[in-house]
Amino acid sequence: MQPRLELVLPVQPLHLYRHLLREATYLPAICRPFVYSRIRGGFDRSTEAIATARRKIPPPTGLDDPKTKALHHGLRQLRGLRAVNLGDYKRLDRLLHHVFGRAGKRRRELLAPLLQPSAPRDSEELQKQLLEKQGAPLVDKLGRPLRMRRPDGWDRRRILTYVDSQRAQQKATSPTDWGRIGTQSAYSSKADDGRLPPLDAYGKPINERRKRKLLERWWKSAATKMAPPLEKTEWEKIKAAATGELPDNDWKFAPRRTIARSSKPPAETKWDWTSLASKSASLAGRPVIRQQWRLTGKQETGPYGFQRPQRDALPARTVQRAYERIWNTTSYIEQNPETLNSKAIHWGGERGLDLQLPVATAKEARIFGFGEAAESTAREGV
């Protein structure tokens, strides 16, 4: 494992910010813009929160101090980025889900325009939307207005169309591709379909709040598991990374730069026995967990050490499969240029009819017996 550039204690926010930006330069070029924006945005918000906290009397201390929170969060993200660059596949998969809007903040940003009602196509739809907004709000049996629920104000028809398309894509792809997103369920809301009984178990009418909660349950679950569409250009870039058509510099990890070192030999240091004397034998002799060496940067050198050398980076084929998993969960919506309505939804994994398998040579066909069958058929005159 290559040596890492350690932070000088006590850790300062600006030093941590530089280390995060430096670690992000080793990520693939397709991921860097998103990571850069998140790092800069987090640093700006933390700086503003720290300045606001200093003006308070008395200033917050301990875990309530924004500086302490920012340092804890930044150090955790720095360890995660280092683990990704060292070949941690699980954290790479999590990073790609955040970069391409399958999870996290960007997913919510991409989902917001999909939930909003579309623009009316004619005057009749415009009048219908105005009447719905001007209608009297729903009230309970005591006359109190009911608060807004999840599906209120959403374009339900468009959401149902997209959910059905996503369910079809989930059936056509591997379930492991949707592990972080979740599997969509079919639309079945008793409150929306009017299948609730008119009376409850006590012989009283069904409460309006109960109907709305049942109605909200499915829509909330569907919105939570939706994989929002991307722009066509970004979708095609993910496709190129998954199929190997993208240049290597755009989807591969950058080589790690060597750390500058002094030309003079390092001075001999004495064995620090005080750090071991203050610990118990069980704690001092505890082996380093092999699964955590990419996070901690420590490897076991004692009798518990793993003799096989560790790989420092993921193979190119493994990285390409990670992009392919993301491509299977992404889509783009083709719009009608005249009405700007959704025309078709295209998902990843659709390689088209132009994909042709290579023709087997005579030597390859003879391995599976195809060559002998062809020769016997020719001798029989069939």
Image (cartoon, rainbow, N blue to C red):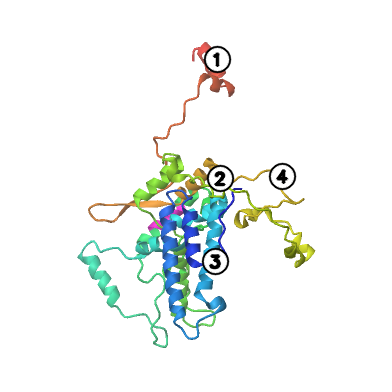
Query: Between 247 and 102, which is closer to the camera in this rendering?
Result: 247
Which residue ends up furthest to the left in the rendered image? 123
Q: Mark 4 points at which residue?
A: 307
Range of residues picked out in magenta: 161-167
Is residue 111 one of those drawn in magenta? no
Sequence order check: which comes first, mark 2 or mark 1? Answer: 2
Q: Mark 3 points at which residue?
A: 11
Q: Disc 1 residue type?
A: Ser
Which residue ends up furthest to the right in the rendered image? 281
Sort mark 3 into few (<14), some (14-19) or many (20+) by Cα contacts within 10 Å. few
Q: Disc 4 residue type?
A: Gln
Residue at 72%, 64% (x, y): give it.
275
Sort mark 2 into few (<14), some (14-19) or many (20+) by Cα contacts within 10 Å. some
Rendered location of residue 44, percent (x, y): 41, 68
Q: Using residue 295 as the reference point, say whether residue 279 is left or right of it.
A: right
Residue at 37%, 51% (x, y): give it.
332
Camera-near label (4 vs 3) is 3
Q: Using residue 254 as the reference point, say whether residue 10 is left or right of it.
A: right
Q: Is residue 113 above or below residue 329?
A: below
| Residues tagged 1 and 4 counted as in contact (Cβ below 8 A) | no
Sequence order check: which comes first, mark 4 or mark 3? Answer: 3
Q: Mark 2 points at which residue?
A: 314
Q: Is the magenta stretch mostly helix, strand or loop?
A: helix
| Residues tagged 4 and 3 counted as in contact (Cβ below 8 A) | no
Q: Using residue 166 as the reference point, say whether residue 119 is left or right of it.
A: left
Q: Distance between the residues labelled 3 and 1?
A: 78 Å
Which residue ends up furthest to the front in the rendered image? 264
Q: Distance between the residues labelled 4 and 2?
A: 19 Å
Q: Disc 2 residue type?
A: Leu
- Confirm whether residue 107 shows in the render: no
Q: Name the residue under label 1.
A: 376
